[in-house]
Image: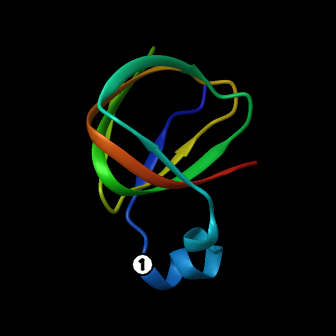
């Protein structure tokens, strides 16, 4: 199973990918299970999140670029309300 990838990208790289034109998703602090049918890439604008998978826990926060692989089953724990740009595929 592929792992969640967390990285820091330059503003130039984010702009080149068109990240700031992607839709925005917001959710208050909460916990819920999730399954990714397809790959999701997202850029965290605000918040703090931990995502638990069989491999362990991955945390991310403002400024992180996160890629979730297709087929991933996980448990989201939003510690601080989250806002993110996202794109599937």
Q: What residue lies at 55% left-to-right and 72% top-to-bottom?
A: 20
* SS under mark 1: loop
Q: What residue lies at 40% left-to-right and 51% top-to-bottom?
A: 83
For this view, does 66 lie left or right of residue 28?
Answer: right
x and y percentages locating residue 57 in the rendered image: 33, 25
x and y percentages locating residue 63 in the rendered image: 33, 63
Name the residue beneath numbered marker 1: 10
Which quarter shows the N terminus? top right
x and y percentages locating residue 24 in the rendered image: 54, 55
Q: Is residue 10 above or below residue 84?
A: below
For this view, does 36 lie left or right of residue 14?
Answer: right
Specify the quadrant of the image occupied by residue 76: top left
Name the one closer to the observer, 24 or 19: 24
The local crowd at label 1, few if under 14, some if 14 to 19, many if 20 or more residues have their Cα within 10 Å, is: few
Name the one closer to the observer, 65 or 46: 46
Number of callouts in the render? 1
x and y percentages locating residue 78 in the rendered image: 31, 32
Scheme by which the image is coloured: rainbow
Q: What residue lies at 30% left-to-right and 57% top-to-bottom?
A: 62
Q: What residue lies at 36% left-to-right and 19% top-to-bottom?
A: 31
């Amino acid at each position: 199973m592929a792992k969640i990838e967390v990285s820091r990208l330059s503003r130039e790289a984010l702009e080149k990918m068109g990240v700031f034109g992607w839709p925005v998703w917001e959710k208050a602090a909460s916990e819920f299970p999730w399954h990714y049918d397809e790959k999701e890439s997202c850029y965290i604008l605000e918040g703090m999140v931990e995502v638990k998978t069989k491999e362990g826990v991955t945390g991310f926060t403002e400024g992180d670029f996160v890629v979730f692989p297709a087929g991933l089953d996980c448990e989201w724990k939003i510690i601080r309300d989250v806002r993110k740009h996202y794109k599937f595929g």
